[in-house]
Amino acid sequence: MADPTGGAAGNWATPAGDGTADVPSKMSNSDLYDRIAHNLFSINVVWALMTGFLVMFMQAGFAMVETGLCRAKNSANMVSMNLLIYLLDA
């Protein structure tokens, strides 16, 4: 294995200078492992960011639903309460 401890996870996998970087059959096992590890790390980061954004939009949606279910005179209070709860939970 190229990185048995996982200490180099997330490091940029530099392409080979001889032009074999894009052909998996011509790559060494070490280079192939580096590429796969880099892709897995990138996918995990993108997935974590996407789910974080979804949670933030869900909180805004809950605030809108709760505001829509209260009387008009209390709507500003409901929005501010939901915003305060969101900021204090973060």
Image: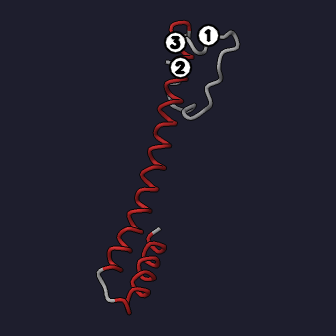
The answer to the question of whether label 2 and label 1 lie on touching residues, with beta carbons closer than 8 A, is no
Residue 4, above or below 81: above
User: Mark 3 is on which residue type?
Assistant: Pro
In what element is the residue under mark 2? loop
Where is residue 17 shown, x and y percent of the image? 70, 14
In the displayed structure image, the side of residue 68 where residue 29 appears, left or right = right
Q: Which mark is residue 2?
A: 2
Mark seen at residue 75: none
Judged by depth in the image, the label closer to the viewer, 3 or 2, is 3
Q: Where residue 54 sits in the image (x, y, percent)? A: 41, 56
Q: Would residue 83 appear left or right of 30 to someone viewing this image?
A: left
Mark in the foreground, 2 or 1? 1
The answer to whether marks 1 and 3 mark residues whose Cβ atoms lie closer than 8 Å is: no
Secondary structure state at the residue bearing disc 3: helix
Q: Gap between marks 2 and 1, in whole Å?
A: 18 Å
Tell me the residue that label 1 is attached to: 20
User: Relative to residue 32, is residue 54 depicted above or below?
Assistant: below
Is residue 6 shown above or below 59? Answer: above
Q: Residue at x 65, y 20 (%)?
A: 15
How is the structure coloured here? secondary structure
Residue drawn at 42 percent across, 87 percent down: 77
Residue ID for mark 3: 24
Q: State how far apart marks 3 and 2 are (Cα).
A: 16 Å
Disc 2 marks which amino acid? Ala
Give residue 21's quadrant in the image.
Answer: top right
Work out whether residue 88 or residue 75 is closer to the camera in this orientation and state it: 75
Under mark 1, the amino acid is: Thr
User: Residue 43 appears at what percent x and percent y?
Assistant: 47, 37
Q: Position of residue 58 (x, y in %)?
A: 38, 63
Q: Earlier in the sequence, mark 3 or mark 2?
A: 2
